[in-house]
Amino acid sequence: MGTAIVWLVNTVLMLMTWAIIASAILSWLFAFDVVNHRNRFVSQLATFLDAVTGPILAPFRSIIPPLGGIDITPIVALLAIHFLRILFNEMSRPFLITVLG
């Protein structure tokens, strides 16, 4: 059971990492007019990624101002997620695996 919880937490953090990366790449594609919002699939994908990554990026956006029009909050969020993953794996994983099996 402990191994399953560790796997679940690590998988969720990895999926959040990929969602933030995909959202950043999609925002660059919009900025350089490679894709547009008129495409239905692209619009739905952008809405989904904004809904998923918005709650994670919002606290960082309230603290970190845009630097010359460049939003560095995805980088800070990725660093925070990586930090949480390391912290969880080093501190909670041994405890969960020994207690829950």
Image (cartoon, rainbow, N blue to C red):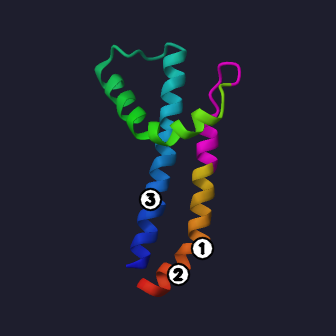
- Residue 73 in the image: state x and y as whole percent: 61, 35
SS of the residue under disc 1 = helix
Disc 1 residue type (three-letter): Met
Task: Report the quarter where the N terminus lies.
Answer: bottom left
Q: Earlier in the sequence, mark 3 or mark 1?
A: 3
- Residue 11 in the image: state x and y as whole percent: 44, 59
Span colored in magenta: 67-79
Q: Nearer the viewer, mark 2 or mark 3?
A: 2
Q: Are marks 1 and 2 in contact (CB under 8 Å)?
A: yes
SS of the residue under disc 3 = helix
| Quadrant of the image occupied by residue 61 | top right
Disc 2 residue type (three-letter): Phe
Which residue does the image show at 57% across and 60% down from the upper left? 85
Q: Is residue 37 above or below residue 44?
A: above
Q: Is residue 80 visible?
A: yes
Which residue does the image show at 63% across and 39% down from the upper left? 75
Q: Is residue 39 above or below residue 21?
A: above
Task: Tell me the distance, in whole angstroms, between the alpha carbons under discs 1 and 2.
Answer: 7 Å
Query: What residue is pinned by disc 1?
Result: 91
| Quadrant of the image occupied by residue 69 | top right
Left or right of residue 73, residue 54 in this image: left
Task: Tell me the distance, in whole angstroms, between the alpha carbons under discs 3 and 1.
Answer: 17 Å
Task: Tell me the distance, in whole angstroms, between the alpha carbons under discs 2 and 3.
Answer: 19 Å
Q: Earlier in the sequence, mark 2 or mark 3?
A: 3
- Residue 32 in the image: state x and y as whole percent: 54, 15
Query: What residue is pinned by disc 2?
Result: 95
Residue 92 included in the magenta stretch of the image: no
Task: Report the quarter where the C terminus lies.
Answer: bottom left
Which residue does the image show at 47% across and 48% down from the upper left? 16
Query: What residue is pinned by disc 3?
Result: 11
